[in-house]
Image: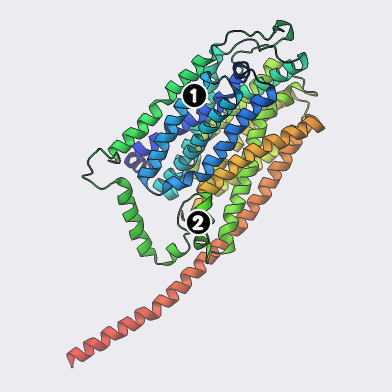
Amino acid sequence: MFVDERIVTLFKRNAHHTITYWSLFFSFGLCIAFLGPTILDLQCQTNSTLSQITWVFFSQQFCLLIGSSVGGVFKRTLFSALSALFVSATVISVIFAIIPLCHNVLVLAIAMAVSGLAMGVIDTIANIQLVTIYQKDSAVFLQALHFFIGFGALVSPLIADPFLSETGCGNHTGNGTEIMHHFRSMLRNSPIAEHSINQSHLPQGGGEEDSNVHYAFWIMALINLPVPIAVLFLMYREQLIPCCPRGNPRLLDKDELAMENQQGAEGPDTEEHGAGGHGDIFSCCQNDNLRGLPVSFFMIHILGGMVLFMTDGIVGAYAGFVYTYGVAPPMSLPHKTAGYLASIFWAAITAGRLLSIPLSYRFRPVRLLMFNLAGAIVTVLMLLIFYTSSTFLFVGTCLCGLFLSSIFPCMLAYTEDILDYQGCATSVLVTSAGMGEMVMQVLVGSIIQTEGSYSFLLCGMIIACIGFILFIGLLLFDRMHRNYLSGTSKKSAMVEEPAAEQNGSTKREQKETESS
């Protein structure tokens, strides 16, 4: 068979949990990419400027980062994890339902921030729960999990497009109109319908075209509504709802019992160097968790997070500014043609994550990481060499999406395997990836504005090379950590061997005494 029967058996045993977490990430992908296409309509709705509305979206991204950082707090029991997921999924539906009622930019910013906080909690908990369930077999299921993000991000512009208005509000100049046209096409990630914005069509008295975008947000809320229902049903099946009887032990109780038995068989060193298992960023920094751990333990967390800081930063910057690069000299593509670049990039990420599901079963995560990082560097280098070729820009965009698509789930599976699923890698990596995507977009955008469009690819090349160097450092500390663990195991064996011999000699003496 193409897939090991053991993997299929594991999936069947945990199918309800796994499918629920996948549905949460499909909803997560819808929420991430849904806001971009509606930026002009939201600007009209709140009667705000471009700078004000972009800070609204920044507030959502920043709170998503906070939610990712603190999400590990809720992982301690299955009840707390599923309760947090249920509340977060419900909050997302409620927020999207009330967004059309937010006619003040500050109120809209608060609504976006709350939705970002809920999405961050979902991001961390879903990753942690899958890693906890499948552990050394989690790579395949993490690839599928992150495929659903790309799939949701690919589908969401199709939902919004029929309800978007064709014109703006008329509260900006002709130059500002061109900027808005670029910005909207950059964020939409879908060229299904090209909304041309022309200053001659904009009313100067502050009037605006009636918008139907509120229907799009309400549809989004309805599409997301089955997700909290699915989480609630999972809690019902696991007998975690207080009003339901608890005749049988909960699933997590059985898992915890099995893990305790496994830790008892492995010896006391497992708990000593475990740092308390998966947790949030703040609990990982407590002194009690850090005592007696080697330097390699900390460096694996730091370097793994820095690699994702760079690679997810490239994803955010490329998706955000590839349109701007395409319409600027020397490419000078038509706006409609350049609008396809972001869609191709997201489609390639979705296809790459789907392709990585069988590949992660056949190959170790470290090999996939090496291949993807090297492929991303070579692709950006070729884009720099053929910077005047519009054809290769489309080909390179597709290749970039394919190579960058599976780096996050592979890195997550790789670092958790190094730490034997006892560290805080999931929370650290999710937080680092979110920070990279947020920081690199601001940094690369500022450099493009001051140095020109060519610096877009140059920044990508520099970031990719730094990420690869950090990954080489991670490999070195991986070897150091494994040597440390093997040395600790040998010392434990040397201590246990004399004790076993002493017990054997004592038993022999007792038998001799009884026989005499």
Residue, disc 2 = 419
In the foreground, 131 or 290: 290
The mark nearer the N terminus, 2 or 1, is: 1
Q: Position of residue 73 (x, y in %)?
A: 46, 47
The image's mark for residue 96 is 1
In the foreground, 106 or 39: 106
- Callout 2: helix, strand or loop? loop
28, above or below 327, in the image: below
Q: Position of residue 119 (x, y in %)?
A: 50, 35
Hey, what amino acid is under mark 2? Leu
Is residue 334 something one can see in this rendering? Answer: no
Q: Nearer the viewer, mark 2 or mark 1?
A: 1
Q: Residues within 10 Å of mark 2 (few under 14, many from 20)?
A: many
Direction from residue 21 to residue 398 in the image, left or right: right
495, above or below 283, in the image: below
Q: Quadrant of the C terminus?
A: bottom left
Q: Position of residue 137 (x, y in %)?
A: 43, 47
Image quarter of residue 320: top right
Tell me, yes or no, whether the two marked residues, 2 and 1, touch with CB atoms within 8 Å.
no
